[in-house]
Amino acid sequence: MRNRLPRRSAQRPARLLSLLVPLFLALLSVAPLVAQGGRGGRGGLPPDDSRVRASYEKREVRIPMRDGVTLFTSIYIPRDTSRSYPIMLSRTPYGVAPYGEAYKTSLGPSPTFERDRFIFVYQDVRGRYMSEGKFEDVRPVKWQYSGKTDVDDATDTYDAIDWLVKNVPHNNGRAGMWGISYPGGYAEVGLVNSHPALKAVSPQAPVSDWGHGDDWHDNGAFRLPHAFGFIAGFDWPHGGPITTYPPRMQMPTQDGYAFYLEAGSVGNLDAKYFNGSHPYWNELLKHPNYDQFWKDRNLLLHMKDVKPAVMTTGGWFDNQNLFGALQLFKHIEAQSPGTVNSMVFGPWVHGGWARGEGENLGDAHFGSATSLFYQDSIEYPFFAYYLKGRGTASPTPKAYVFQTGSNRWQKLDAWPPKSAAAKSLYLRADGKLSFDPPATGGAAYDEYVSDPAKPVPYTKEVNNGMTSTYASEDQRFAATRPDVLVYDSGALDHDVSIAGPMTASLWVSTSGTDSDWIVKLIDVYPADTPDAVPMTYGEHLSGFEQLVRANAMRGRFRESFETPKPMVAGQPTKVEFTMNDINHTFKAGHRIMIQVQSTWFPIMDRNTQNYVPNIELAKDSDFRKATERVYHTTQMPSSIKVMVVP
């Protein structure tokens, strides 16, 4: 374990950090992660690369692909040549800076890797920064190849590793890959028809299926601020090699809620801010359905006959790629049962395991330095075993997961746990929530008016991007709104642990012809819960309503994501959708809460509530108020299906 400085116990610095850290993480959520490159210096001074420079030699090369295109690659080789080293490869669209004479200030996934010595390789993917060729967002993987000109990111990865093991001195013939977010997607692609030297891969929060559950979409609903903010800073066409990109667009206000509401229809944003300069934005808006455009870019379909050992990493509070990480593990299990396949999930936001200590997320506290534990005790041993032969047994169980609520790590031989049993949490009359189904009598439904002109905010923060802490945020700000339904279990007399996927099964109706349905699972703390340190100024854990999981569903896709269908006004309809997995214990004395609403803005774009072929290209005049009903009778029981662990 690394040496760590003693923590200060003063309250004021702790509170200041609790305010600044969420802001810092929010800025990172739409930017290249620092784990992929060096860090800048302070006050305009150049970064200090002396430590890396003393131990490593840097080489910059252009590696030829089978079609003649060359990819710019930065290689850091240990100066100690008394032994051979495995290769750690990261392929990225974010640039391998610094270019030229300067060195990175840190190497590898964590400090332990740099100290123990690997050959670290960073490569600009095809068409990005200093690499030749044409870039394509999540380039489709080919099912068959013909000739040397037939290429994709899988062949580029193969060719890069083949060149490296043949040309880089002092390598031991073994290679590993890692990456977070988009680079995690490139690590995932490396599993397809992999090079024999590739022995271990850790896709971390990987881009897997942008058309369904990753980054841009959640069961058909559009993640507006993430898509707009990311593309504004990433999708800049260029005519040749570059080392820096233009500055990202400056938002005219810090208030994203006001910004996107004033913009009106999503289709207005291009004319107002992009003027056709970001072609991928317009391409994205043309495909609101899960059509062939998205199916061609679904990396999960290609996880057959995977040869390297795989350790997929994700965060339970990741607001971008939790779906991709979960589904990658599950697809490898199903399509490649002979693969050494494991999953690691902790209480982290997007990439949180690679930065910070991981002791808390906003006002949700986890009792230990979970990120440092992952780096030292899970991530490093995985690569050391498969690339250096360290250890005597496979270091990672099938599922190495952190259970929030109880705040403990678990080693499991299956996911979901074999002991988990399916149960349903039923929405009942008078705002009750119970594992018992509704009995006869009582009101048949609850209702509210959903107004697109006054949507429910997804966070109480003022933020013009996508705040990274909303996924565990106190939901009391939403519970008091008249357009949010609240169902409460009452105080639990024993611990209730839920592990695995969830399914929202709602009987609903709308006075319109389309609607969104957002379901939130919440852990309500007892009124006598003492505050933790640090706490956000003015916030308290007394009655804290911690968000555990939330997902949206666009009603038009209730039967098919490929073929949307209007809802029939006033007709009770079953809308059922899968929510992302959780691993959480609701402690005795806590309460389980479900909130149901039809807007969640601007994390999700607004539904017109009046069926149109493409909501993203709707006219401002298409948006309508609608009366929404949620039914809870014996004939139409609304529930959340969960997996309960004894």
Image (tube, helix red, strand yellow):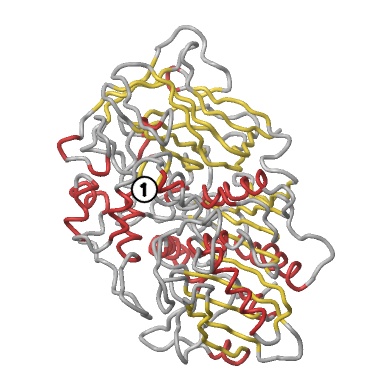
Instruction: State whether residue 542 is above or below residue 155.
Output: above
Q: Is residue 3 visible?
A: no
Position above or below: 581 against 558: below
Residue 164, horizontal then vertical, whole percent: 62, 79
Tell me where residue 43 sits by quadrant.
Answer: bottom left
Residue type beneath disc 1: Arg
In this view, which residue lies farthest toward the top? 441
The answer to which of 244 and 550 lies nearer the viewer is 244
Residue at position x 27%, y 39% from top? 615
Residue assigned mark 1: 223
Q: Is residue 310 visible?
A: yes
Residue 424 as seen in the image, left or right of residue 453: right
Tell me if residue 611 comes above or below residue 95 in the rendering. Answer: above
Q: Residue at x 35, y 66 (%)?
A: 234
Residue 484 x %, y % = 35, 31
The quadrant holding residue 94 is: bottom left
Q: Quadrant of the N terminus?
A: bottom right
